[in-house]
Structure formats: structure tokens, C-alpha cells
Amino acid sequence: MRSLTKTTPEPAALVRVRGELSRLLAETGRDVLPRDWELLKNPDKQAVREQLHRDQRGLCAYCMRPISTADADNDPVGMRIEHFEPRTAAPSRMFNWTNLLGVCAGEGMHSGAKEQTCDRARGSRTLRVNPYRRSPAPEDAFRYSRPRSSTPVEAAGVEVNSHVAPDDVLALNLNAGSLRIARAAVIQRLRGELRAGRTAASLLRTYEAAHGGTLPAFAGVATVYLRTKL
């Protein structure tokens, strides 16, 4: 994870749908239900995805894989709209802009087996670290480390751990094999560029400045590593 900032104003579609929901609840006398999320339809959902994509600079809010603005149900590199407070636990907040994140499809492959990560792995479990909040900030909660062994970094992977919210790591399956290997590849590539004469400061600018509105994959991992080299 990396710290994120919400842009304002929120998508107009959310304001409109909250109004529709209020009228519906007043007419029926019932409470809000998780299935009321279906009131947000395309192209309104698309507008929400696009603003989340801009805010997150094209990376999953949880694992930092690249995501597009397409619907992840139709595109394997698309986006799922995630509720930090799940609809089942906090249905009244399902259309709150501050409660929405853009996440990856949550599926990967490792050693020939399928893996689920991010919101697909989480389900409705409670999380403590929200990338859009500063307490606790993701940079304070999570660390990336390689096991102390002679195993090559590509095989050992770069693990993520949290002294603040270890249950978040488990719930989101952030140490899935496919993620560990991908993070390790980023570190290995950076090591190669440093050996070739690139400076940590110049590389850091690449991973902190958006190019065409997006950041490189696993930018948060790269910045943590490069700051140790300054």
C-alpha cells in the first residue's frame, strides 16, 4: 500500500445516487441494504472508476498492481470498486466517496495455481489500514523485506509485513506468491540500474512522478527501497 489523496469534488454520480436512495427509503420505509449498490449503473460506475484511477495514479489501492479504468469483470487488468467499510457492515456508507477505493481484479497465478488477493481474498473482513487515511499511514504500517538466505531474490520474493495491522496482510493475501515475485523483480531491476550508474535520487523521481497520469507497478515498494539508498 501507499498513501493516497482523494480529489474533490466527488463524482457527481454519487451525489445523485445518494439522493435517489434517500427518496427510495422514504417511499418504502425500509433500511438501506447492501444490494442498493446496484443503483449505481454505467456510465456512472465508469465515472467513479476514472476518478479513482486518477487519484491512485493507475495502481491498485492495496497491492499496487497496475489497473485500468475498465470493469475488472470484463478485463483482467481492469478495476473493481472496493468499499473499505464493506457494504454488509456499513451499507449506509456504500456511496460515500471517502469509502471507495479502486482495486485490481484480485487474481493471480503462482506455481501453476490460482491465487486470490486484495478484495477477492478479503471478502468482508475488517481492515485497519486505509491508504486514504493518515493514521495509521501505510508507510508506517507496512515493511518490505527479503528473507535472510542465499536464495536468489526472484525466488525468495520480497515479503510485506505489518507491525501495526498484521491481520490486514493476511486478509488481503499481500504475501501471495505472485505478488512476492513481482515485487522482487522490481527490486532486482533497481539494483541493476544502480550498478549501471543510475542514482537513487533519479530513480526515485521516476517512481514518485506520474507519467501520463500513472505510476510504475509497485511504485510504493520501489520508493521504500530507493530511500534506503539515498
Image (cartoon, rainbow, N blue to C red):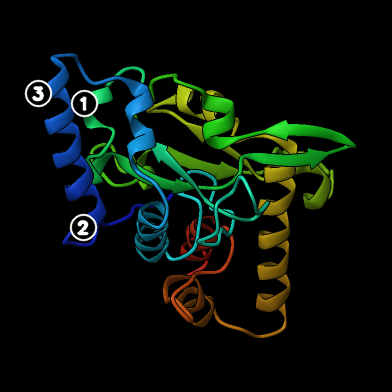
**Which sits in the foreground, 25 or 48?**
25
Task: Give residue 35's quadrant in the image.
Answer: top left
Q: Can you see residue 129?
A: no
Q: Residue furthest left?
A: 26
Horizontally, is 6 left or right of 148 in the view?
Answer: left
Asked if marks 1 and 3 touch (Cβ < 8 Å), the reply is: no
Q: Residue furthest right?
A: 112
Q: Residue furthest front?
A: 27
Q: CA distance from mark 1 to mark 2?
A: 18 Å
Image coords of residue 91 (percent x, y): 27, 23
Q: CA distance from mark 2 to mark 3?
A: 22 Å
**Which sits in the foreground, 106 or 110?**
106
Q: CA distance from mark 1 to mark 3?
A: 14 Å
Q: Mark 1 or mark 2, which has the lower sequence index? A: 2
Total count of labels? 3
Asked if marks 1 and 2 touch (Cβ < 8 Å), the reply is: no
Q: Mark 1 or mark 3, which has the lower sequence index? A: 3
Horizontally, is 177 left or right of 8 in the view?
Answer: right
Q: Which residue is mark 2?
A: 12
Residue 76's tag is: none
Image coords of residue 65 (percent x, y): 59, 54
Image coords of residue 147 (percent x, y): 70, 38
Q: Which residue is mark 1?
A: 92
What secondary structure is marked by label 1?
Answer: helix
Kindly identify the amino acid type of the residue bearing the numbered disc 2: Ala
Residue at 48% from the left image edge and 81% from the top image edge: 212
